[in-house]
Amino acid sequence: MENQPRSTAPPVEVWGGIECTINRVGDRYIDQFDSSGHYLRLDDLDRFAEIGLRTLRYPILWERHLPSHQQPDWRFADERLARLRQLGIRPIVGLVHHGSGPRHTQLDDPGFADGLAHYARLVAERFPWVEAYTPVNEPLTTARFSGLYGLWYPHHRSNAAFARMLINQCRATVLAMAEIRKVQPRAQLVQTEDLGQCHSTFLLAYQADFENERRWLTFDILGGLLNRTHPLWKHLRELGIAESELVFFLENPCPPDLIGINHYLTSERYLDERLERYPGYAHGGNHYHTYVDIEAIRVPEAEPVGPYGLLKQTWERYRRPMAVTEVHLGCTREEQLRWFGQVWKAANRLKSEGADIRAVTAWALLGSYDWDSLLTHERLHYEPGVFDLRAERPRPTALAHLIRGIARKGTPAHPTLEEPGWWQRQTRWTVPRASEVGILKVVKRIPSRPLVIVGANGTLGRAFARICAQRGLFYHLLNRQEMDITNPSQVQRVINQLNPWAVINAAGYERVAQAGRD
C-alpha cells in the first residue's frame, strides 16, 4: 500500500500575549503592567511586530479603565490600540483577567455580570473596529482560586462559592458579548480556559473523574451544553445555583467562536493518598479522604496526556475552531524553546489530522511576576518570557528568535529542540518510585548535533559542561589533545567529524572571572 500523502496545509499561526493580570489579594491590587513597566513603553508593541506577530491578546481591563462609577479613562487604551492598528496587529481584547472587577463589585456580587456588560458596551463603542474579545479570562480557574482555594479576593473556600463565581463570570461573558455585538455584529468570542487532566491512585479515581468532568464547565455552560442530563447539573443545583440561572444559558447560548486552551506543565495533576511520600504543604483532601494534589509530571506512576492529547480531547468534544492561547514555561531558555516547540508540534499534528486549530500563542511576551506564589506575594519574582526586562531595554531572548523564524519560515528551528525537555527526563521526579507498574516512558535522546566545549582540563570548561548537563544540552568536552585550537587542520577535522552547532573555547582558563573580562 502506498503511503498516504502528507498534509500540505500551512502551519498554525503564531500569536502573542502579554501577562496582564490585575487581581486582588485582600485590599491590594496587583497589576502586571505596573511590574513590567509596559504602561510606560509604547514601543513594546513595535518589538512584537518586529518578531512577526500579527495577532495579540491585549487587555483593556475593567479595573484599570473604569475603577469607579465615573467616566472611563481611555488614554492608555486609545494610544495602544491605535498603535496596534498602525502596525497591522489584530487585538483580541480582554476585559477581566483573573480579576474581580473594581472595588465596588466582586465575583460573587449579583451585579458583577451587569457591571461588566456595561463596561463591555463602552469599550465596543470606543473601539468599534475591534472584532475579537475575551470578556473574562479563565472563568473556571479564577473561580477555583478565588472561591475554592481562597487565594484571591474575595478569598472564599467552599464549593458553593466556587459555583457562584463561575456562574457569575459565565453570565457576565454572555451579557458582555451581547452588548458588544450591538455595536459590532461581527465580534467573536475567544474564550480561554486552563486545561489539564487529573490522574490518581485507584482509591481516588472518583475524585479524578469528577475533576476531569468539571474542567469543561466554562465551555459547556457558555455553549448551552449544560442541560438536565449533564453530569454536573445536579451538582450545581445542590451548591445553590437556581434552576433558572442554569436555564438562562440554555436559552441564551454563547458558544465560543474560538476555544482558547491555556496549558502549562503544572496543569496536569496527580492525586495520591500516600501522604508520607510528599511534603506537608501539599497535603489536602475532600470530605472523604486526605490526599496530595501535585503536578503529575513529578510522579513516576503518572502518565500525563500532554499537549497533543489534551488538544485532541478538546477537538473531539466540541468540534469548534480552537487555538492554544497561552504557552509559557518559567525555566532556562533551552527549556522554554523545547516547551514551545512541543506545543507547536502538537498543534500542527492535530491540524494535519483535520482539526480546525488556528494558532499557538507565545504568552508572557514580557515575562511575568510573582506567579511562583500564584500572585499571593508581591516580591517581584521575575520569569523572563520572549523578552527579558532585566536589561536597560527589553532584550529579545532565544524565544524571540525562534518565533521570528516561525513567522518567516513556518517551522521552528534550533538545535536544542532535538533534546528532551526536563519534563521528559527522569530527573523530573520528586517522589520515590513506588513500583515499576505504570511508569511513564522517558523520552530517549535522538542523536543530535552537539555543543563542543574546548578546555576539558580547565575550570571554565568543566563549568560549561556542568551547565550543559543541567540544561539537557548534548555536548562534547574536549581536551587539548583532542582539539588543539592552535592547530587549524585538527580543528577543522574535529568540526567535520562532530558537526557541532556551536563551539565554546574555554581552553586556558583556570579563573572564570578572567574569562568574563576577556
Image: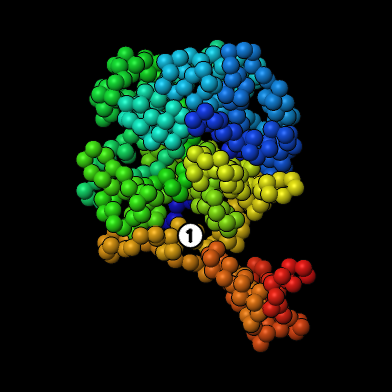
For the residue marked with disc 1, what is the amino acid? Trp
User: At x 48% / y 14%, what residue is drawn?
Assistant: 114
User: At x 40% / y 34%, what residue is drawn?
Assistant: 150
Asked whether residue 146 is in view, the answer is yes
Q: Is residue 478 shown above or below 151?
A: below
Closer-to-camera residue (271/286): 286
Percent of width and height locating residue 36: 65, 40
Asked whether residue 140 is in view, the answer is no
Q: The N terminus lies in which quarter of the figure?
A: bottom left
Residue lying farthest to the bottom in this orientation: 481
Q: Are there few (<14), some (14-19), or many (20+) residues within 10 Å of tag 1?
A: some
Residue lying farthest to the front in this orientation: 27
Closer-to-camera residue (93/371): 371
Closer-to-camera residue (408/219): 219
Left or right position of 362 against 298: right
User: At x 38% / y 41%, what residue is drawn?
Assistant: 313
User: At x 52% / y 28%, what residue is drawn?
Assistant: 27
Percent of width and height locating residue 438: 29, 59
Q: Is residue 94 shown above or below 4?
A: above
How many dots with numbers?
1
Percent of width and height locating residue 364: 59, 42
Left or right position of 436 against 493: left
According to the image, label 1 marks what residue? Answer: 422
Percent of width and height locating residue 401: 67, 51
Question: In which image quadrant can residue 427 be found?
Answer: bottom left
Q: Is residue 290 shown above or below 439?
A: above
Left or right position of 241 against 512: left
Q: The C terminus lies in which quarter of the figure?
A: bottom right
Which element is circle 1 on?
helix
**Structure colour scheme:** rainbow
